[in-house]
Amino acid sequence: MRSSDARRALGFTVVLAAASALSSSAGAQQQAQGFGVERFYPSAPGGGWFVMDAIDMRGGLGGAMALTTSYARDPLRITDGSQHLNVVSDRAFTDFGFAVTYERWRLYLNMDVPIVTAGQDGTVGGYQFTAPSLNPQQNPDTLSDARIGLDARILGGSKSTFRLGASAQFFVPNGERSDYDTDGTYRAMVRALFAGDVGLFTYAGHLGVHVRPLDDSPTPGSPQGSELLFGLAGGARVLLAGGNEALIVGPEVFGATAFRSFLGSSGTALEGLLAGRIEGVTDNGPQLRFKLGAGLGIDQRFGAPAWRIVFAIELFGHMSDRNKD
């Protein structure tokens, strides 16, 4: 064989080997399917705090409506130690909530409407991530998962120093997993709630279980099945001029950890908000409550953002108290 023919044969062999290697590498990459990335679940309409619940329902038949708007930066940042990818870099949504209350009970519905969800495509840890691209003009997604909830106060009155309650929520899936606004499965949350008022100090917290069937491990940053929920909030109450309204300012810290990697870095999210709200201090007629909060991802993993801002307005009221508790 002539040397030129040998060189051509060798070159052809090298090209074939490279193409085969590239094809094999591409075939080894798996496509991440997406999931409901949001870790901020607004409290029930009339609940007081952004995430925690004051469980101060009282009086006869009543109701509440709430509008909550949130923007989160980098809620899903994937890394394998050497590579970093902001799969979801921007997420904004509006939550509409409606509740019916009676004495110690509350039945409610929350509906999330995505406004903007955007991010970056890329590959991390052998998985191909396709970023969502939701916006009102080109690619709207009118409704993500809806939540149906039932809360009850078990111990204490509406203004007691210690109140104990229970909460159950059921998630009805809607939307597309590839948009990172749903798991595509039915989910549920069961929580123990506690709250109280001690002079000018008010507090609330919860501990519960998120029954989450989706387990996408070992896909980086994805859900790992059912989770432990936890959270705590506390603040000082200051009467405003006139004495008919109060300002409550304090932190809220909340998070979740997957049971299969309990308190491990790969399956734990932790977020904190500095929250303030203005509300009426009387029980006469309908009441308005305005809330504003801003915070950081304390453990920025598994859906906890780099930072978040959130605003909410609530309208609530009830018939005259049957029990002065």
Image (tube, grey):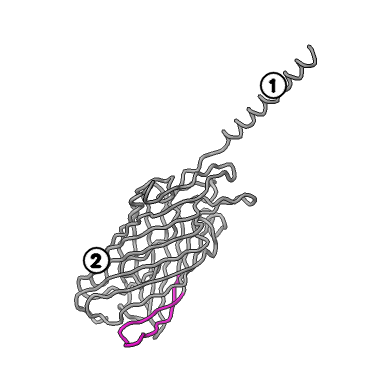
- Quarter-of-image position of residue 170: bottom left
Residue type at mark 1: give it.
Answer: Phe
- Quarter-of-image position of residue 190: bottom left
Q: Is residue 246 magenta?
A: yes
| Residue 30 in sight in this render | yes
Residue type at mark 2: give it.
Answer: Val
In the shown orientation, is residue 253 left or right of residue 155? right
Which residue is at the far top? 1
Residue occupied by mark 1: 12
Extent of the magenta region: 232-250
Which x, y percent locates residue 226? 45, 54
In the shown orientation, is residue 160 left or right of residue 119? left
Give the class, few, some or many, for how many residues have Cα within 10 Å of label 2's Cα (few <14, many ≥20). Answer: many
Q: Is residue 167 magenta?
A: no
**Which sits in the foreground, 49 or 156?**
49
Which element type, helix, strand or loop, lies under badge 1?
helix
Q: Is residue 120 above or below residue 102?
A: above
Which element type, helix, strand or loop, lies under badge 2?
strand
Label 1 or label 2, whichever lies nearer to me, is 1
Q: Quadrant of the N terminus?
A: top right
Q: Identify the main secondary structure in magenta.
A: strand
Give the class, few, some or many, for how many residues have Cα within 10 Å of label 1's Cα (few <14, many ≥20). Answer: few
Residue drawn at point x = 80 percent, y = 16 percent: 3
Residue occupied by mark 2: 100
Which x, y percent locates residue 19? 63, 28
